Image: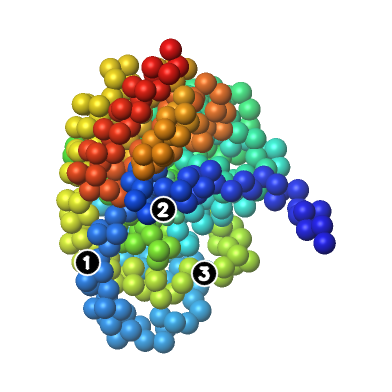
C-alpha cells in the first residue's frame, strides 16, 4: 500500500514538532532538560487528589462520568467567573467555553476562521504550538516585529494596513518563548489598532498567574473585549495532564467554535472538568498557587544568577517577572544549533530559537531556556556547562 498517496494535501503541512524530537533526547536518563515547558512534577497537588476526587464523586456522582454539554461543565464555568474577573476578564458562565487544553482553542479558532491562503499575523518569535495548530488550515503568515518589550504596535498597524488579516495571535504575558510581557501603554495601543482595523486577536494567556515579582498587567481582552478571543488554561496552575483550557470569545465566534468542536471530541472530559471546578470553587487553587510560585521563583533567580556569571557580555537575555522561559540572544552570526550539539554531549538541552520563527533566517543566534523543570543547583550546573560551551563555540568559529 502506498499510504503516502492517501494523505490529504494539508497533512503535509503538519510537521512533527522539532521540540518534541529535542524533548525525546532531553528526557533520556541523566540529561538536564532546559528544553521543554514542563511544569515541575513537585508543583502538582498530588496530596489533595484523593480528597478532591472524593468530593467530586460525592457532589456530582454519575454526572461526573456522563456525556456533557460541548460548551463545558457548568459548575466549572461558574467557578471560573470570579477567577477570570480577578485577572480583569469580565465574563458570565455562559460566555466561558471549556476546551481540551488551550491547544484545543488554537485548533478551534483555526478551524472556523482560516481558509487556505488567509493571513494570520504572529509575533516574531511566537509559540511553536500555535503554528502547528494553524498550519493544517493552510494560512499565510505575516510577522509582527518585536523588541525588548514585545510586539511593536507600529509594526502591527502596518501589517493590518497592508492586507486583510483574519487573525492576530499574541502571547502578551510572559511569552513563550521569550518570557516578555507587553507593557500597559502598548496594550492600549494594540487595543486601539485592533479597533481601527476591525481586527480579531487571539490573546493566549497561559502564564499570567505565574508571576514571581512586580504587578499584574491587564489583559488586552479587558481593553478591547469585542476584538479579542481570550484563551487560558489550568495546565500551569493545576495539572497539564488533565487538559482543561478555557476561552472567552465574542458570542458569534463562541457559537461557531462550539459547533466545530462537536465533531472533534464532543466535549472535554467531564470528570477532569468536575475536578477543576472543585479545585477552584473549594479554594484549592488559591492555596496551591503560592506553593507553585515558591517552587519556581528560586529556580528563575538561580538561572538569572548563573547567566550573569557564565554568559559572555555580548549575549543578551530577558529578565521576565514570571512565566517559565528565558530567551537568550547571542551576537549576530552565533550558531545556537552548534551550541546545542556541544551541550547535548554534556547532558544539557535547550531549544534553538529559530524554531519559534515563521521566517527563521538570521535568527540562529537565539535560544530558549526553561527554568521550571530543574532545581536551582542543577540549573546553576547546567548554565555553567552552557557558558563553557559558548566559549568553546566562539573560539572554534573565530
Ligand atoms: C503559549 C502557549 N499556549 C498554549 C499552550 C498549550 O497549553 P495547554 O494545551 O496545556 O493548555 C502552551 C503550552 O505550553 C503555551 O506555552
Percent position of residue 62, x then y: 41, 87
The residue that mark 3 highlights is 267
**Whether residue 280 can be seen here:** yes
* Cβ at disc 3 under 8 Å from ligand 1: no
Mark 1 vs mark 3: which is more N-terminal? 3
Residue at (57% x, 28% y) in the render: 359
The residue that mark 1 highlights is 284
Mark 3 vs mark 2: which is more N-terminal? 2
Between the residue at mark 1 and the residue at mark 3, the CA separation in whole angstroms equals 24 Å
Q: Quadrant of residue 84?
A: bottom left
Percent position of residue 376, x then y: 20, 44
Q: Quadrant of residue 164?
A: top right
Residue 133 or residue 257, whichever sits in front: 133
Residue 227 or residue 129, whichever sits in front: 129
Above or below, 373 relative to 74 = above
Residue at (25% x, 66% y) in the render: 45
Between the residue at mark 3 and the residue at mark 2, the CA separation in whole angstroms equals 34 Å
The secondary structure type at the circle numbered 3 is: loop
The residue that mark 2 highlights is 28
Percent position of residue 37, x then y: 38, 48
Mark 2 vs mark 1: which is more N-terminal? 2
Residue 371 image label: none
Residue at (61% x, 60% y) in the render: 260
Amino acid at each position: 500500500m502506498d499510504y503516502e498517496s492517501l494523505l490529504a494535501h494539508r497533512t503535509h503541512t503538519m510537521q512533527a514538532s522539532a521540540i518534541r524530537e529535542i524533548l525525546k533526547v532531553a528526557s533520556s536518563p541523566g540529561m538536564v532538560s532546559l528544553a521543554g515547558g514542563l511544569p515541575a512534577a513537585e508543583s502538582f497537588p498530588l496530596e489533595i487528589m484523593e480528597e478532591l476526587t472524593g468530593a467530586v464523586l460525592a457532589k456530582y456522582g454519575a454526572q461526573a462520568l456522563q456525556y456533557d454539554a460541548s460548551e463545558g461543565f457548568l459548575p466549572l464555568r461558574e467557578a471560573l467567573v470570579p477567577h477570570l474577573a480577578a485577572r480583569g476578564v469580565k465574563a458570565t458562565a455562559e460566555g466561558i467555553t471549556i476546551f481540551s487544553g488551550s491547544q484545543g482553542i488554537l485548533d478551534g479558532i483555526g478551524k472556523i476562521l482560516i481558509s487556505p491562503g488567509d493571513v494570520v499575523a504572529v509575533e516574531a518569535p511566537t509559540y511553536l504550538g500555535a503554528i502547528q495548530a494553524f498550519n493544517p488550515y493552510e494560512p499565510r503568515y505575516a510577522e509582527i516585529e518585536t523588541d525588548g518589550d514585545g510586539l511593536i504596535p507600529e509594526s502591527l498597524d502596518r501589517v493590518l494596513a497592508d492586507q486583510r488579516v483574519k487573525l492576530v495571535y499574541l502571547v502578551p504575558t510572559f511569552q513563550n518563548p521569550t518570557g516578555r510581557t507587553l507593557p500597559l501603554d502598548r496594550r492600549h495601543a494594540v487595543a486601539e489598532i485592533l479597533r481601527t482595523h476591525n481586527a480579531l486577536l487571539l490573546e493566549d494567556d497561559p502564564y499570567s498567574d505565574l508571576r514571581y515579582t512586580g504587578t499584574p498587567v491587564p489583559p488586552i481582552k479587558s481593553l478591547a473585549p469585542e476584538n479579542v478571543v481570550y484563551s487560558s488554561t489550568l495546565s500551569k496552575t493545576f495539572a497539564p495532564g488533565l487538559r482543561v483550557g478555557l476561552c472567552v470569545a465574542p458570542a458569534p465566534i463562541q457559537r461557531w467554535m462550539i459547533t466545530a468542536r462537536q465533531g472533534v471530541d464532543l466535549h472535554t472530559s467531564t470528570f477532569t472538568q468536575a475536578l477543576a471546578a472543585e479545585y477552584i470553587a473549594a479554594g484549592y487553587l488559591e492555596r496551591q498557587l503560592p506553593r507553585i510560585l515558591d517552587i519556581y521563583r528560586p529556580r528563575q533567580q538561580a538561572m538569572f544568577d548563573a547567566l550573569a556569571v557564565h554568559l559572555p557580555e555580548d549575549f543578551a537575555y530577558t529578565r521576565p517577572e514570571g512565566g517559565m522561559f528565558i530567551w537568550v540572544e547571542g551576537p549576530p552570526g552565533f550558531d545556537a544549533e552548534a551550541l546545542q550539539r556541544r551541550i547535548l554531549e554534556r547532558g544539557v538541552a535547550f531549544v534553538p530559537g529559530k524554531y519559534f520563527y515563521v521566517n527563521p533566517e538570521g535568527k540562529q543566534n537565539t535560544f530558549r531556556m526553561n527554568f521550571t523543570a530543574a532545581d536551582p543547583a542543577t540549573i546553576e550546573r547546567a548554565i555553567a556547562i552552557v557558558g563553557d560551551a559558548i566559549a568553546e563555540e566562539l573560539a572554534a568559529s573565530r
